[in-house]
Amino acid sequence: MAEMSGADMVVQALVDLGVDTVFGYPGGAVLPIYDALYKHPTIKHILVRHEQAATHAAEGYARSTGKPGVVLVTSGPGATNAVTGITDALMDSIPMVVLTGQVSTALIGTDAFQECDTVGITRHCTKHNYLVMDPERLGPILHEAFHIATHGRPGPVVIDIPKNVQVATGEYIVPEKIQHKSYRPQVEPDADAIAAAIDLIAAAERPIFYTGGGVINAGPDASAALRQLVSLTGAPVTSTLMGLGAFPADDPKWLGMLGMHGTYEANMAMNRADLIIAVGARFDDRVTGRLDAFSPDSKKIHIDIDRSSINKIVPVDLAIVGDAGRALDALIAAWQDKGLKARDYGEWWRRIDGWRATRCLDFPEKKDAGADIMPQRAVKALFDATRGRDPIITTEVGQHQMWAAQHFGFSAPNRWLTSGGLGTMGYGFPAAVGAQIAHPNRLVICVAGEASLQMNIQEMGTVSQYRLPVKIFILNNEWMGMVRQWQELTYESRYSNSYSDSLPDFVKLADAYGWTGLRIDNLGQLEDGIRTMIETPGPVIVDCRVAQLANCFPMIPSGAAHTEMLLQPSDVTGTMDDEAKALV
Amino acid sequence: MKIKTEAGERHVLAVTVDNEAGILAKITGLFSARGYNIESLTVADISADHALSRITIVTNGPPPVIDQIIAQLDRLVPVHSVTDLADGGAHVEREIALVKVAGTGDKRIEALRLADVFRAKVVDTTLSSFIFEITGTSDKVDRFIALMRECGLVEVGRTGVVAIGRGSEAL
């Protein structure tokens, strides 16, 4: 094969790996790759306005398609700006490959212009990373990097490429088969463990499925398998924030999200269950509440592709290491082989219905046209107005995120893009950009808070440049609402720096970028405003003014158990002991 | 509020890894990031083609933490295998120390006599100093060094523990 430059190899490898979109920002140390991209019109490069946004856009692309997101940034500040998104992808198991430029090999370690130790900085926020010192290693490394990013528990992989390696020539080598020498994640579940799980499920009187982002990562078939297994067993289902959409929210077996801002019925059912079947979920502190009170009387089955997630926080009775979809398929097959039927969980459902009767997601509101809009009402109205349009919803991080999770019903996977593990304000808008690029004809809405949105608001320029019809729906309460809520819970409402002062006029900002901007001030304008947003072609920003002091309930406060939920504002005392204060 | 710590037990882990730049940083970084202890760590290339290194880590923690350490190490991409040598039955542990003792007269004679008891070798000598090489378990090395403190100890270098399972089985 003819020799080619390292930069051409990078682009050729991307083409060979089926990459159609790269999110990036040029700079000195990646100019050779940008020049190579110039000649390859099949790869679409999306020019963001800040490298962090490139990583979140790649996450949005990945989460909405199941394919890895690809990022291209320069050395030094390009790489360091990408670190937040790389860490976000690690925490939420998003497949992503980040190509970073680096100074030439002879300059590495000399504090050269725009030099940073990219592999050192990203060593602990990537699944794996590489520094490529020889152009002939580029082919094998790129192919291996995509394999690692997408196999086993997905995650971000960084490839740092010095500028002289991009310029030097060599042979482009494509590995015949990716068989990594040490990385061989277990995908197929152990048959004995599956049989043992079936026995536990068949014997349970109060079982519950607790599902997470692993089901989404395992692909749409895994969501279908979950639905089938739930229907075969008749057991109720709850899910983490990351798992929303794997099970339809309108199914009677759906208990809603669990955890800190989950539903009362989901948390009570977890607490009282005699069997928890955890599928692709990792017993995060936001889910478990106080650990010594977490589901005290249950046996626990944990299905996870990452062995280190098992017994990390909660000791379990039965571990099944493997892909969530394969494990669910195996459970279905074993259940059917044994000719098992769903048990009558009548008593269990009666208790669940009792918890449901608290109607924990209800909220007080005034109904007249001039009334303040409750943020929960705004989300519900958005949900009602977009039914049948199969929208993709992204969120920023905070109260609006929790209200969206509580009040927007998802019925299919890959429609809900949110930053769960890292909780990155500034994720939602660029993620919406990535999702819209992947799905040009779909309705993509970023539900935002006015504070989070400002963390990556510069991406309005990206949206304008590529004429993306992204909609931003701001629940504007003029506060960093979740910070303020915690200050009310813990610090007797001493509002230290949580007021969103000096906000821009979002409608004028829309105008400045060539978007449509509109403002919704009261309940009477809500439905029309949302309809206008949906029906207006091109990008729209909606400044939806909501009741400023509304808080997000129900809530498990810091250090409390599932059974100690705050259901309404009057449950808040305003103080906490130090043990609780020390918890995030 | 006081921060609580948990008592642990000592484990020796043998970790086989790709012999590549950054792997040691990855492993030690994992320990520091997740708050695990390292009592000692040794690393050397062990294969004829220089492709593999063996890292021996002595750590301590409660059993669930040890399990977590093993699982966290095992999922790193360049890690081939992780073995808890305490799990595999009996194993042999050795450490080498070089111990420099300076002095003359009775202390010098006592140092030499104790070195003989511990089967430490003299690897360098002047009229006013010895360097002893001692090989053994960490415990034995500790005891020897403690005695040498009374005999004019001026400098110590230790390798940290290497360990291997007994019998014909290999990792």
Image (tube, rainbow, N blue to C red):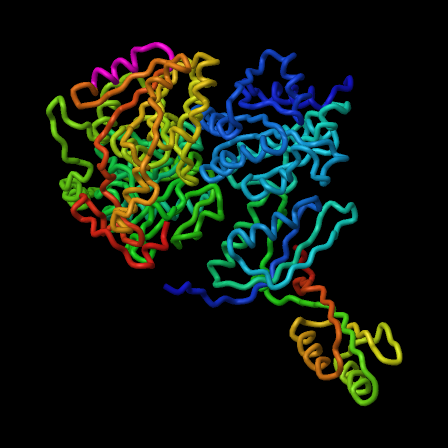
User: Which residue is located at x 78 percent, y 74 percent?
Assistant: B100
Magenta span has A572?
no
In the picture, residue A146 is in which quadrant? top right
Q: Is residue A342 visible?
A: no
Q: Which of A390/A528 is in front? A: A528
Provide the residue span drawn in magenta.
A527-539
Q: Furthest-bottom residue in view? A: B106
Quadrant, the N terminus of chain A: top right
Magenta span has A536?
yes
User: Which residue is located at x 41 percent, y 23 percent?
Assistant: A432
**Location of residue A444 in the rendering, given as x and y in whole percent from the top left corner:** 37, 20
Please, is residue B130 above or below residue A400 in the view? below
**Location of residue A466 in the rendering, given as x and y in whole percent from the top left corner:** 47, 13
Q: Which of B116/A553 is in front? A: A553
Q: Is residue B69 left or right of residue A423?
A: right
Q: Is residue A434 left or right of residue A445?
A: right
**Location of residue A136 in the rendering, given as x and y in whole percent from the top left corner:** 74, 28
Circle count: 0
Q: Which of A331/B104 is in front? A: B104
- Magenta region's main secondary structure? helix
Q: Is residue A195 left or right of residue B44?
A: left
Q: Is residue B157 visible?
A: yes
**Location of residue A107 in the rendering, given as x and y in whole percent from the top left corner:** 74, 35
Please, is residue A358 above or below residue A540 in the view? below
Q: Which of B120/A286 is in front? A: A286
Q: Furthest-front residue in view? A: A502
Please, is residue A385 above or below residue A365 in the view? above
Q: Is residue A275 left or right of residue A180?
A: left
